[in-house]
Image (cartoon, rainbow, N blue to C red):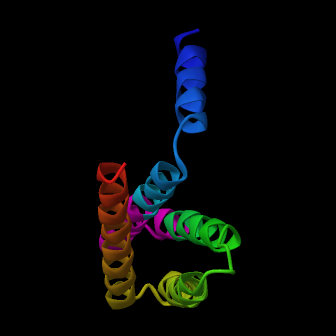
Amino acid sequence: MESKGFHQYKEQSINTMTQGELLLLLYDELVKHLTRADLALDKENYELLEASVEHSLDIIHYLEDTLDMQYEISANLSRLYEYFCYELSRVKLGRNKTELTRVKGMVSELRDSFRTAQKDNDSGK
């Protein structure tokens, strides 16, 4: 019973978020899965590594699918998302820690940029 109430609360919270808040939530989840992949690689838990990379790829594909291509930045983000997918495929196949660290860093920087933009937007209201 408690679980059902929590899921309803969680769903309602998501439904009332702004687009900026949802974007940050997606990026937070992406960073979480990349961190999980990094830890799994360190522990040589390749099953968890592959699952975490797959979740990351799903999030990136969703982010790419929701881009509004009428804006110039969307084309740039699309190319960046393609790069992330390419590198994460290499991580998954070759268990390449260097590439995983690079992608995780870039995603974290991008998330932080969106977070700053969201704060600036919120304070300008």
Compared with residue 117, is residue 74 higher up or lower down, i.e. above or below?
below
- Residue 42 vs 86, above or below: the answer is above
Quadrant in which the N terminus appears: top right
Q: Nearer the viewer, residue 118 or 51?
A: 118
* Percent x, y of residue 30: 46, 63
Label tally: 0
Q: Residue sitting at 52 percent across and 40 percent down?
A: 17
Q: Residue furthest top?
A: 1
Q: Main secondary structure of the magenta part?
A: helix
Q: Nearer the viewer, residue 61 or 71?
A: 71
Residue with the most extreme front position: 125
Which residue is at a point 68% across and 80% down the rendered structure image? 69
Q: Residue at x 58, y 64 (%)?
A: 59
Q: Position of residue 62 (x, y in %)?
A: 65, 66
- Give yes or no for residue 66 being in the magenta stretch: no
**Residue 20: horizontal and vertical position, in percent?**
48, 55
Residue 2 drawn above or below residue 117: above
Locate residue 29, reporting x and y percent: 45, 56
Q: Is residue 92 left or right of residue 43?
A: right
Q: Quadrant of residue 57?
A: bottom right
Residue 35 on the magenta span: yes
Which residues make up the magenta segment?
A: 31-50
Between residues 80 and 84, which one lies in front from this camera angle? 80
